[in-house]
Image (cartoon, grey):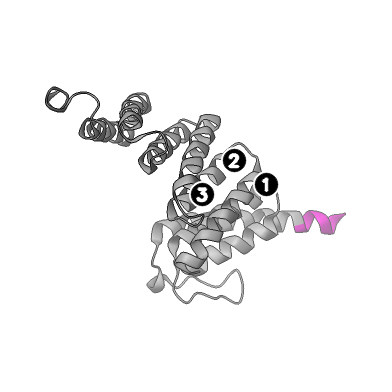
Amino acid sequence: RVLVSFHGKNHRLVAAAYNNIGVVYSEIGDSKHATEYMKKALDIKKKVLGRQHPEIATGYQNLGAIYFEQQQYDEAISHYKKAETIRLKNSAENHPELANIYANLGQAYASKKQFQKALDYYQKDLDINLPRLGNKHPFVGDTYRQIGQTYAGLNDYEQALSFYQKALEIFIRDYHPENDFQPLPLNRIIYPAMLLKTVELKAEGLKQYTKETDDTELL
């Protein structure tokens, strides 16, 4: 209220305050109020900055993330694509924020079980991040993990295991095992949270791959 009375309701500081309130609501799991305040922030920024400003793209990305958490995947995709359109008008095609948008689109399409579209967007993410960050960066490893999950969704467990392995080799320094059963060198773990998730996924993928192989041998 103080900001509104001092600056007027259509001011960047008011928009920033609304956005911050939205972030707090998002962090405590109140998606309804998070969406409400982030929309207020976005509406003000459109008036102040114009509809094609990079900050508008960020606003769409933030709203897309909230819709994704609510499992409203079509709304999430719609907002991510609006962000993509603005970024492409204002930035180079290899801008880091475009990589983030493509990763988010990949997740949303994977959640809708549109796995090929998900793979296409994950590849766009890698096309930007691999040259920019190198093949040992955790962002790249996380994309490999998500590609592995996507192949698992397609029941292609051999490809899934291949990408889980690529992720593991990023999350653990100098990890190049000769087989899938070699113990993990715990003293060289550098991204423990990502590693744990990947190990769980790889274990499930290996289980499914082994089951498929056994079933084929029985035929």
Say which label, 2 or 3, has the lower sequence index. Answer: 3
Residue beneath the point at 70% across and 49% down: 155
Name the dominant secondary structure of the magenta segment: helix
Q: Position of residue 101 (x, y in %)?
A: 48, 46
**Residue 116 badge:** 1
Q: CA distance from mark 3 to mark 1?
A: 14 Å
Q: Position of residue 1 (x, y in %)?
A: 15, 23
Badge 2 amino acid: Tyr
Looking at the image, do the residues carrying marks 2 and 3 touch, with CB atoms under 8 Å apart? no
Would residue 193 be counted in the magenta stretch?
no
Q: CA distance from mark 2 to mark 3?
A: 10 Å
> Quarter of the image containing the C terminus?
bottom right
Badge 3 amino acid: Ala
Say which label, 2 or 1, has the lower sequence index. Answer: 2
Q: Position of residue 55 (x, y in %)?
A: 35, 41
Q: Residues within 10 Å of mark 3 (few under 14, many from 20)?
A: many
Q: Residues within 10 Å of mark 2 (few under 14, many from 20)?
A: many
Q: What kind of element bears circle 3? A: helix
Q: What kind of element bears circle 2? A: helix
Q: Is residue 50 above or below residue 1?
A: below
Please state which of residues 145 and 18 is positioned toward the viewer in this rendering: 18
Q: Which residue is mark 2?
A: 109
Q: CA distance from mark 2 to mark 1?
A: 8 Å
Q: Which residue is mark 3?
A: 103
Q: Give the residues drawn in magenta, as a range.
A: 213-219
Residue occupying the far right of the picture = 219
